[in-house]
Amino acid sequence: MAASRLIILGVAVAAAGGAGYVAKNMAATPAEVVDTGPKEQAVKLSQVLVLASDVPMGGAVNGHLAWQSWPADAVNSNYITRSSDPDAMDQMKNSLARMAMYSGEPLRRSKLVGDGQSFMSSILPSGMRAVATRIAADTSAGGFILPNDYVDVIMTRRKDSENGASGFITETILQNIKVLAIDQAIQEDEEGRRVKVGETATLELTPQQAEIITVAQQMADRLSLALRSVADAQQKAENEADYLVSGGSRRGTIRLIKSGEVTEVGTSK
């Protein structure tokens, strides 16, 4: 009996020792793992003024602006940053969009018309003129001519012959002319079409072309606009009606327009 008790007591002592050993290992603090690899550097950010929503050409940018974080390395020198111009949003609240701008696009001052500036004169390229001419549905491709389209200007006038018979002469006096506006609209509607036919087209012309169309408006029974393909927009104009203006005349002459005919009368110097 004494021997069995000693055996049981030995087993108990051994079990207690094993349990203590396991508990000691579980409580031990694990060794720290040292990361010797290269650490990624934080990206430097800059606050850039962007469009929070789409703004159409001629629309006010007020309420459409927001500051957005951009990687500093990707910031263009033309962008407006909060660090260099913290009051920019307030300063530009009365500005208009010189062209259509879209959500998320960084704002540039070159795309804005400042407060108090004329919008049409701001979008007109240097050296060009804006001239308005009356149009109707039957002289403007059925109302399908829109701002930023390119057109030819066709003049139709009556021609009386010597025997008393009458007819018409038609000629293209201007070619590949950009349409700046139809009535007061300087862009398409949201669905890309006009909802009514305009009565006045404003055209982008050189000074010489402006003189040509001014003379033609006095001579013509009708001026029509012929819509051109967008693929032809870069073609150079040829054979315009330069003979209508004094730029090609001799000095000391006056051009007279009578019954649709152009004549030159000499003057004394």
Image: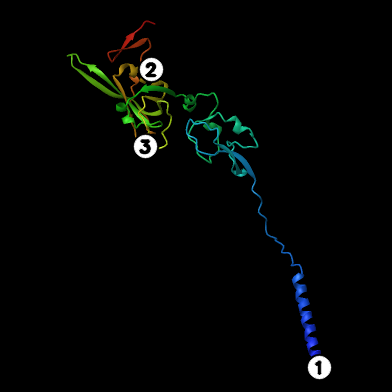
Callout 2 secondary element:
helix
Left or right relative to 55: residue 161: left
Between 192 and 24, the one nearer to me in the picture: 24
The crowding category of the residue bearing disc 2, from other C-alpha atoms within 10 Å (few below 14, some 14 to 19, many at least 20), is few
The disc at residue 231 is 3
Identify the residue at horizontal 63%, vertical 37% (top origin). Answer: 82
Foreground mark, 2 or 1, reads 1
Q: Residue furthest top?
A: 268
Please state the total of marks drawn on the protein image. Answer: 3
Badge 1 amino acid: Ala
Dividing the image into 4 quarters, which one contains the C terminus? top left
The disc at residue 186 is none
Between 4 and 27, the one nearer to me in the picture: 4
Whichever of labels 3 and 1 marks the residue nearer the N terminus, that label is 1
Badge 2 amino acid: Gly
How far is mark 3 from mark 1, CA to CA? 112 Å
How far is mark 2 from mark 3, CA to CA? 31 Å
Badge 3 amino acid: Ala
Residue 128 place in picture, x, y as percent: 44, 24
The crowding category of the residue bearing disc 1, from other C-alpha atoms within 10 Å (few below 14, some 14 to 19, many at least 20), is few
Cβ atoms at labels 2 and 3 below 8 Å apart: no
Q: Residue furthest front?
A: 1
The disc at residue 247 is 2
Callout 1 secondary element:
helix
